[in-house]
Amino acid sequence: MPSLQGLRANMASLSVLDQYRLYLTADFSSQHGCVAIVTGGLCGIGFSTAKHLAKLGMHVIIAGNNEREGQEAVKQIKEETLTSKVEFLFCNLASMKSIRQFVKDFKAKNYPLHVLINNAGVMMVPQRKTVDGFEEQFGVNYLGHFLLTNLLLDILKKTGSPRHHARIITVSSSTHYVGELNMDDLHSRYCYTPCGAYAQSKLALVLFSYQLQQLLAAGGSHVTANVVDPGVVNTNLYKHVFWLTKVVKKLTYWLLFKTPDEGAITSVYAAVAPELEGVGGCYLCHEKIIKSSSITYDEDLQQKLWAESCKMVGIPNLINKVIST
C-alpha cells in the first residue's frame, strides 16, 4: 500500500482517474468502529462515497427517500465490499417531518456518529415546492441538511474526542461562485430560474458550514465542519437540464465529466484523511484547500442566514449563546 506522504508527492503528475485509484487504495488508517451517515447514498456520488467508506471498515448508514432503491444499494455495497456493516434508513430531505423521524430512528439504535456527509441534492428542477412550502432546491439541498445536521449535533459532539474529531462534510459545488443569496426571497418566489435557485442553495451550504464551524470551535466541541466540491460528475442530477445541454453532456461526458467514483474522492478524503484531523472551516476541491467565493466569508451574512434558517425549520437559534459542549 502506498504511504500518504508518497501519495501526495506523486499527485501532481497523475490524471484524475489515477488519483482516484491511488486515494481509494491508499493506506488510510482503519475506520473500524466508526459510524457514518451519507445522505443521497442510493446512487451517484453518494453511493460511491458510502461504498468506499464501507471498504475502509466504517459502519455506513445510507439515508435516502426510496426504500426499494435503498435496499438494493445496501445489497450491492455488501456484495462489493464483503461487509455487513451497511444499512438503509428512510429520510426524505424534502420533509421536515421525515428528517425528524430519521433522527429519531437513528438515535434509537444508540450508535455513535463519527462522520456525517451531507451529499443528497436536486439540480435545476422546474419551480416547485417541498411539502413544507419551501422552494425545492433550497429546501432539499440546503434546509434539509441544515435541520438534519443540527438535530444530530448532540451525537456528533458526544462521539468526537480530542484525538478523533467527529466530521461534518457538506457537498457544495463550484456553482456557488456565481450564486446570489436573496435574503428577502430565499425561495425565489418572485424571480425563479433553475440555475439561479441551484446556485443559491449551494452558496447557502458554504455559508452554513463556515458558521457552523465557528460555533463548534467557540463551544470547544470536538467536531469539524468542511465543504467539498466534487467537480463536474456524470450523474442523473442532469435529467432536468435543457435538452441541448443533455446532448453536449452525452457527447463529451467521457472527456469533461468525472465518474461518480472519481467524484467521491474529495468526500472520502475529507472523511478520513489524517491531515484534516481537527481542521474545519475549509473548502476542499481535488483534495486541496482552496478559497470559496468572497461572499462566503461574510460573517454577518452567515449569521443572518443561520437565524432565518432556524425560523424556517423550527429550531432555536443558539448563535448568540454558542452551541454548548
Image (spheres, grey):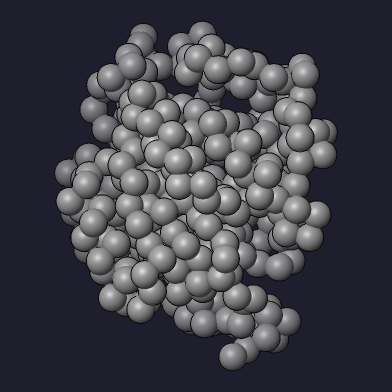
Which of the image's four quarters has the C terminus? top right
Q: Residue at x 32, y 77 (%)?
A: 80
Q: From the viewer's side, name the closer residue of 295 and 284.
A: 284
Is 106 drawn above or below residue 97 in the view shown?
A: below
Screen quadrant of the N terminus: bottom right
Where's residue 320, x and y in %? 77, 17
| Up/down of 74 relative to 109, above or below | below
Is residue 12 in view from this perspective?
no
* Residue occupying the point 21% across, 60% down: 72
Position of residue 172 relative to residue 287, above or below, is: above
Residue visible at 62% across and 32% down in the picture: 207
Picture quadrant where residue 259 is located:
bottom left
301 relative to 131 in the view: left or right: right
Does 300 sit left or right of 106 as displayed?
right
Q: Residue 10, percent across and down?
A: 65, 84
Percent x, y for residue 180?
A: 52, 25
Residue at image coords 73%, 59%: 164
